C-alpha cells in the first residue's frame, strides 16, 4: 500500500514544489522535478502492471479512511487497483511522462514555465485518483479535478481572451455532463446505500431491481461520460480546447481526460450490462458521433483542429464498442489511440514550433525536407489511425467493427464510413503538411528546423508504440489467444471474442476495412499529390461543403438557442432584481429611509436646555401615569 500512496502522491508533491517555489527555481530544475514525479508514478505503475501480467500481483481494494457516515450509509475514501486501473495507470503515467519531457523543450521560452508544469502534475494526480477510486465518489473527485485542471491548462495563456473563452466553455459544458453523473450517484446511493463498486455489484446480484431504475441510473452516468468524452451533443468544447499549449492537447485528448467516460462505463460494466436499452443508446450516439466528427475533419485546415475532430470521432468508435458490449475492444482502442494520437498531437506541436506558431496547413508543405524525424513519426501514427495492417489501429478498429457487424449492420456501415473518412483526412493532413513545396513565408522557411531531442525522443517512442501496440490484441486465429481479453477477463468475465464468426467472414471484414483505408489514402494522394489541389480559401466553399467547413454551425445553434436567451434573461433579471429591486428599493430605499429618520431625530438635538427639561418632565409624567394608573 505504501507504493500505491507514493504512486498517487508523487505528482501532487511535484505540483506543490512547482506551485510554491517554481518561480525561484531554474526552468530546467522545475521541468526535471515535474517529470521525475510522474516518472516515479510510472515506475510503480509498471511494477504493479507486470505483476498482474505475471500473476504475482493480486488486486488491491483498500479503504484508506472512513469518509461519510450517515445512518446505514457509509462511504470510505478507498482505492482499487486491479487489471483495468493498472492498464490505465500505464497509459496515464507512461504517456504523461513523455508529454512532460516534451514540454521541457516546447515550453522552454514561456514566462510561466513552472506554473505550466505545476498544472500538468496536478492534472496527473487527479487522473490517477479518478482511475484508482474504489467507489463513484472518489472517482468523482478525480473527475472534477481533471475538469478544473483542463480549465487551467486550456486557458493557460490567459492574456488572450478567446483562450479564456475556450477554457470557460470546456468547464461549463463538462458541468452539464457532471450533473448527470451526480444524479446517477444520488440514485445509486438512495436505492442501494452504497457507492462502492464491489458492494453495488453484490447488491445488484442479491436483490430484484427495477429495470426502469437501472436504465435511469445508467443513462445519467452516460450523460456524465458524454460530457467528459465529448460525445454528441456535448462535444463542442473539445475542438476549442486546442487553445491550450500543444502538450495540453496531447495530454487531454490522448491519455487522460477524454478517456474518463470510457473508463466509467468499463468500470461499471456490470451495471450497464443490466440495461441493454442504455447500451443501445450508447452505441447509437457513438456511431453518429464518429461519423459526424469525421466529416468535419475532412475540411478543417488547422492542424490541431483536424486532430481534435479525429479524437471526437475515435471516441465515438470506443463508445460504439461499449454499446455493443465489446468492453475489451473499447479499452483496446483507448490504448492504441493513446499511442498514435499522442504522437500526432506532439508531432503537430513540433511542426508549429518550427513554423513559429503557424497552424494552418495551407501555409505549410514540404516540411519533411527539414523535419525528417517529425515526418516519419507523424506518418507512422497516421498509418496507424487510418487502420492499415499491421499497425496498431488496424487491430483495435477491426475488432470493434467485427463486434458491431455481429450486433447491428447499420451501425457497422456507419462505423466503417467513419473509418474510411479517417484515412482520407489524416493523409490529407500528412500530404499538405509534409509533401509538395513550401507555401509559407520566406522568413518561416529560413527558420525551419527539426525540433530538439526533448521533443523528438518522445515522438520516436510513441511512434514505435503506435506501430507495435496492436500485438496486445492480435486476433485469436493468428495468436491462438487474445492477450488483452485474457488480461481483462477478471474485469469483463464474459469473453468478448467472436469465435462463432466464421474465419472467412472475419477475413472479409478485415479485407474490407483495409480496402477502405487504402482507398481513403489513395483519394487523398490523388487530390493533393497527383492533382496538386489545395484547400479552398476562406469564403470559397459553397453549399454543403461550407456547412461542413463551419462545423455544421452547431456552435452558432447553441449560441442562438441557449447562450443568447440565457444572457438576455440574465440581463433582464439583473436590471429588474439587482438594479431596480435590490439596489433601487432595498439598498437605496433603506438608505433613504435611514437618512429621513436621521433628519427627524437629529432635530431633537437642538441644544435648547428648556426643551430638554420639557421633554424630561413629560416623559416622567407619562411613566408615573403608566405606573399608578
Image (cartoon, rainbow, N blue to C red):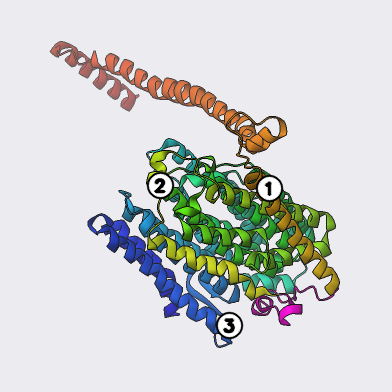
Q: Is residue 189 visible?
A: no
Q: CA distance from mark 1 to mark 3?
A: 46 Å
Label 3, residues with CA under 10 Å away: few <14, some 14-19, many ≥20: some
Residue 136 horizontal/vertical position (percent): 58, 63
Please state the extent of the stretch shown in magenta in the rendering: 475-502
Mark number displayed over residue 53? 3
Q: Is residue 80 above or below residue 361?
A: below
Residue 237 horizontal/vertical position (percent): 56, 45
Q: Is residue 346 visible?
A: yes
Which numbered disc, 1 or 3, marks the residue that appears first in the sequence? 3
Q: Secondary structure at mark 3?
A: helix
Which is nearer the eye, 603 or 354? 354
Location of mark 1 (residue): 526
Which numbered disc, 2 or 3, marks the residue that appears first in the sequence? 3
Which is nearer the eye, 578 or 216? 216
Q: CA distance from mark 2 to mark 1?
A: 40 Å
Mark number displayed over residue 156? 2
Amino acid at each position: 500500500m505504501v507504493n500505491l500512496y507514493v504512486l498517487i502522491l508523487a505528482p501532487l508533491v511535484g505540483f506543490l514544489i512547482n506551485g510554491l517555489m517554481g518561480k525561484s527555481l531554474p526552468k530546467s530544475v522545475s521541468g526535471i522535478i515535474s517529470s521525475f514525479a510522474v516518472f516515479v508514478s510510472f515506475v510503480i505503475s509498471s511494477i504493479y502492471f507486470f505483476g498482474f501480467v505475471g500473476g504475482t500481483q493480486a488486486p488491491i481494494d483498500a479503504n484508506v479512511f472512513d469518509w461519510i457516515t450517515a445512518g446505514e450509509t457509509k462511504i470510505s475514501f478507498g482505492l482499487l487497483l486491479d487489471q483495468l486501473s493498472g492498464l490505465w495507470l500505464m497509459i496515464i503515467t507512461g504517456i504523461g511522462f513523455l508529454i512532460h519531457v516534451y514540454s521541457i523543450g516546447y515550453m522552454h521560452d514561456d514566462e510561466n514555465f513552472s506554473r505550466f508544469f505545476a498544472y500538468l502534475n496536478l492534472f496527473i494526480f487527479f487522473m490517477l485518483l479518478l482511475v484508482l477510486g474504489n467507489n463513484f465518489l472518489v472517482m468523482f473527485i478525480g473527475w472534477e479535478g481533471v475538469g478544473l485542471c483542463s480549465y487551467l491548462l486550456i486557458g493557460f495563456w490567459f492574456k488572450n481572451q478567446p483562450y479564456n473563452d475556450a477554457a470557460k466553455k470546456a468547464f461549463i459544458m463538462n458541468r452539464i455532463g457532471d450533473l448527470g453523473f451526480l444524479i446517477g450517484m444520488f440514485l445509486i446511493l438512495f436505492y442501494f446505500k452504497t457507492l462502492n463498486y464491489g458492494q453495488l455489484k453484490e447488491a445488484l446480484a442479491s436483490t430484484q431491481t427495477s429495470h426502469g431504475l437501472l436504465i435511469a441510473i445508467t443513462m445519467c452516468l452516460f450523460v456524465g461520460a458524454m460530457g467528459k468524452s465529448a460525445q454528441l451533443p456535448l462535444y463542442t468544447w473539445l475542438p476549442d480546447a486546442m487553445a491550450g499549449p500543444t502538450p495540453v492537447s496531447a495530454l487531454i485528448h490522448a491519455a487522460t481526460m477524454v478517456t474518463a467516460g470510457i473508463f466509467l462505463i468499463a468500470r461499471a460494466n456490470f451495471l450497464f450490462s443490466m440495461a441493454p436499452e442504455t447500451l443501445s443508446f450508447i452505441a447509437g450516439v457513438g456511431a453518429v458521433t464518429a461519423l459526424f466528427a469525421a466529416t468535419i475533419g475532412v475540411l478543417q485546415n488547422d492542424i490541431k483542429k483536424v486532430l481534435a475532430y479525429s479524437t471526437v470521432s475515435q471516441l465515438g468508435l470506443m463508445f460504439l464498442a461499449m454499446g455493443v458490449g465489446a468492453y475489451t475492444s473499447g479499452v483496446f482502442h483507448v490504448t492504441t489511440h493513446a499511442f498514435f494520437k499522442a504522437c500526432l498531437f506532439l508531432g503537430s506541436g513540433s511542426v508549429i514550433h518550427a513554423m513559429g506558431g503557424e497552424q494552418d496547413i495551407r501555409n505549410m508543405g514540404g516540411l519533411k525536407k527539414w523535419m525528417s524525424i517529425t515526418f516519419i513519426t507523424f506518418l507512422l501514427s497516421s498509418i496507424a489511425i487510418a487502420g492499415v495492417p499491421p499497425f496498431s489501429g488496424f487491430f483495435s478498429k477491426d475488432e470493434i467493427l467485427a463486434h458491431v457487424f455481429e450486433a447491428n449492420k447499420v451501425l457497422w456501415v456507419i462505423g466503417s464510413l467513419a473509418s474510411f473518412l479517417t484515412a482520407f483526412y489524416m493523409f490529407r493532413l500528412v500530404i499538405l503538411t509534409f509533401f509538395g513545396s513550401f507555401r509559407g513565408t520566406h522568413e518561416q522557411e529560413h527558420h525551419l528546423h527539426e525540433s530538439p531531442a526533448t521533443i523528438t525522443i518522445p515522438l520516436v517512442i510513441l511512434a514505435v508504440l503506435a506501430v507495435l501496440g496492436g500485438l496486445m490484441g492480435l486476433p485469436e486465429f493468428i495468436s491462438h489467444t487474445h492477450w488483452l481479453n485474457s488480461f481483462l477477463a477478471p474485469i469483463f468475465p464474459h469473453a468478448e471474442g467472436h469465435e462463432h464468426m466464421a474465419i472467412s467472414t472475419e477475413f472479409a471484414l478485415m479485407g474490407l476495412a483495409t480496402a477502405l483505408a487504402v482507398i481513403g489514402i489513395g483519394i487523398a494522394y490523388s487530390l493533393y499529390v497527383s492533382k496538386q489541389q489545395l484547400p479552398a480559401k476562406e469564403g470559397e466553399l459553397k453549399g454543403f461543403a461550407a456547412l461542413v467547413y463551419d462545423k455544421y454551425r452547431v456552435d452558432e445553434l447553441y449560441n442562438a438557442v441557449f447562450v443568447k436567451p440565457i444572457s438576455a434573461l440574465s440581463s433582464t433579471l439583473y436590471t429588474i432584481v439587482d438594479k431596480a429591486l435590490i439596489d433601487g428599493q432595498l439598498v437605496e430605499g433603506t438608505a433613504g429611509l435611514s437618512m429621513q429618520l436621521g433628519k427627524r431625530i437629529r432635530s431633537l438635538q437642538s441644544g435648547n436646555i428648556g426643551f430638554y427639561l420639557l421633554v424630561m418632565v413629560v416623559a416622567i409624567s407619562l411613566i408615573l401615569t403608566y405606573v399608578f394608573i
